Image (spheres, rainbow, N blue to C red):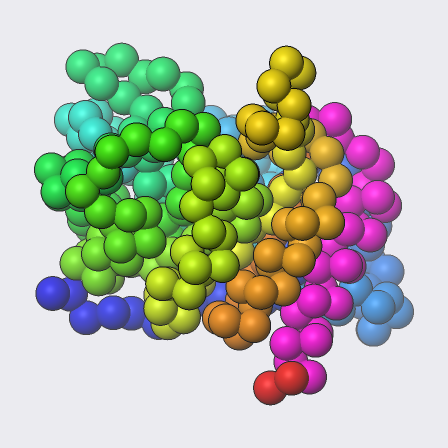
Amino acid sequence: MPQQTVVAGDHLGAGLGLKAEHLDDILALAGSSMGGATSIGDDLWFEVHTENYFVAGGPRLRYLRAVRQHYDLSFHGVGGSLGSDHQSMPAHIKQVRALIDEFQPALVSEHAVWSRSGGQYFADLMPLPRTHDALQSLIDGIDCYQSGIGRSILIENPSNYLDFTSEMDEPEFLVEAARRTGCGLLIDINNLYISSKNTGIDAFAYLSQIPAELVGELHIAGHDSDPELGQSLLIDSHAAAVDLSVWALLEQALDLFGHRPVLVERDANIPPFAELLSERQTAQRYLDQVQVKN
């Protein structure tokens, strides 16, 4: 069993996903913070989807370099397909490694899902069957990824829309993968809330099965109800403000795990930067409360 490594990023507070349309606001905020002129603090960070920067040059890399001068970054992969079809992974990892070497992100993460089969990429994050065979495939994918980039990663729990027969529950599945590879866990609180409503699992019991030392980051986001089925089927849209129930579940997670970097995600219906920053500040207040309790 690999020795468990300490996950980097414990100095980070609440972060936001980096959006190109907010670049001017982000850099202006960085300028205003010099000399302590802002209450945002130096623990703000930004996450990027790594595959969006698989380019040789151009404006995307230029603005990422500008942001990196002032803020820590997290690289969050969406195309690794850790759970299946690993033949094309080395070429993918080579591009991830090049970005890591240049930008030195504080955190690197991927999804504990499958996205490829038979050489075909499906552009989706599909949950794995929680079988021993699927677990071994996920472990093989994590080992390949970590070996290729030269550092440990965090793996994220998926959103589940259907319940299905499994050989183990999801916390056991993810914890075993982490224990056997030395990776950490990224617990997406919104994904967990959606899964609890769609499949009937107990979200707090789920969190209680996760050893705190494995958790390196938390995500929160907004979701939508299905247009036809309503609240009986929730969709992981990242297109709305964080729901009050997700905030409450985040508070429970922080009570269990302690201070962890928290990312506020928004990938559709992007509001003005000030609105997202306000939501980030709410997340930071939750983290500040953890510090006071400890």
Asked whether 77 or 218 is in front, the reply is 218
**Residue 213 on the magenta segment:** no
36 versus 82 height, above or below: below
**Residue 219 at x, y = what percent?**
55, 50
Kindly identify the residue that appears in the image at 15 percent across and 65 percent down. Answer: 2
**Residue 72, can we see it?**
no
Give the main secondary structure of the magenta stretch: helix
**Residue 97 at x, y = what percent?**
33, 44
54 versus 242 height, above or below: above
Kindly identify the residue that appears in the image at 74 percent across and 26 percent down. Answer: 269
**Residue 9, can we see it?**
yes
Image quarter of the C terminus: bottom right
**Residue 280 on the magenta segment:** yes
Asked whether 6 or 84 is in front, the reply is 84
Relative to residue 53, is residue 29 drawn left or right?
right
34 versus 65 height, above or below: below
Tell me which corner region of the image, top left, top right, bottom left or bottom right, holds residue 273: top right
Q: Which residues are magenta?
A: 268-292
Tell me which corner region of the image, top left, top right, bottom left or bottom right, holds residue 272: top right
**Residue 214 at x, y = what percent?**
35, 65
**Residue 228 at x, y = what percent?**
63, 14
Image quarter of the N terminus: bottom left
